[in-house]
Amino acid sequence: MRIATIIYHLAVSCWLGGSALFTFVLTPILFKSYPRDMAGSIVSALFPGYFQWGLACGAVAFFCLLLGKSHLKIASGLILTIMITVTATQAFIIEPRAAELKKQILSFETTPPDHPLRVQFKKLHGVSAAANLAVIGAGIVLVILSSPSAQKKEYAPLVQ
């Protein structure tokens, strides 16, 4: 089904683009423009929608991948499964734990960095950041796998 392939590409592109925009543009602007606590509160308020967006795009992409035709269906399906699993872990495990820790930290601006709650938060934040970058990297791989040259089994070198 040609329409399934088009919707698959659109879902992957929207997920990747949204993740990249949030991670590399929006979040840095917020932390440069506002005090640390305020920027953190804004980003925290956006997280549920951010993860829901990723899960929705992932579900649509996976469904459309199943309907479409591609010799790379197994590889793409595996990558999508990993991306969805990582995003679900962030949405339902990591983010709620981090939000609970943030409630206990009165201010990131005044609480010392070596405070036990901040140390725990920093670890969760590191795991979440790595997971987010992994999802973005996997999304880039999906875009490459769905390129016309990959679909035609033409693997020309990137640099000639």
Image: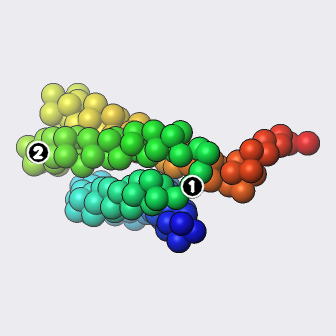
User: Can you say which quadrant of the picture contains the N terminus?
Assistant: bottom right
Q: Nearer the viewer, residue 116 or 99?
A: 99
Q: Position of residue 125 (x, y in %)?
A: 30, 39
Q: Quarter-wise, where is residue 29 in the image?
A: bottom left
**Residue drawn 83% across and 40% down?**
157
Q: Residue furthest bottom?
A: 3
Does residue 21 appear in the picture of this structure? no
Residue at numbered disc 2: 100
Distance between the alpha carbons at the discs numbered 2 and 1: 44 Å
Residue 153 on image: x %, y %: 74, 44
Residue 59: x, y in percent? 35, 57
Res 69 label: 1
Residue extending furthest toward the left: 104
Q: Residue at x 19, y 41 (%)?
A: 93
Which residue appears farthest toward the right when viewing the image? 160
Which residue is located at x 50 percent, y 62 percent?
8
- Number of other residues with Cα within 10 Å of mark 2, as a class: few under 14, some 14 to 19, many 20 or more: few
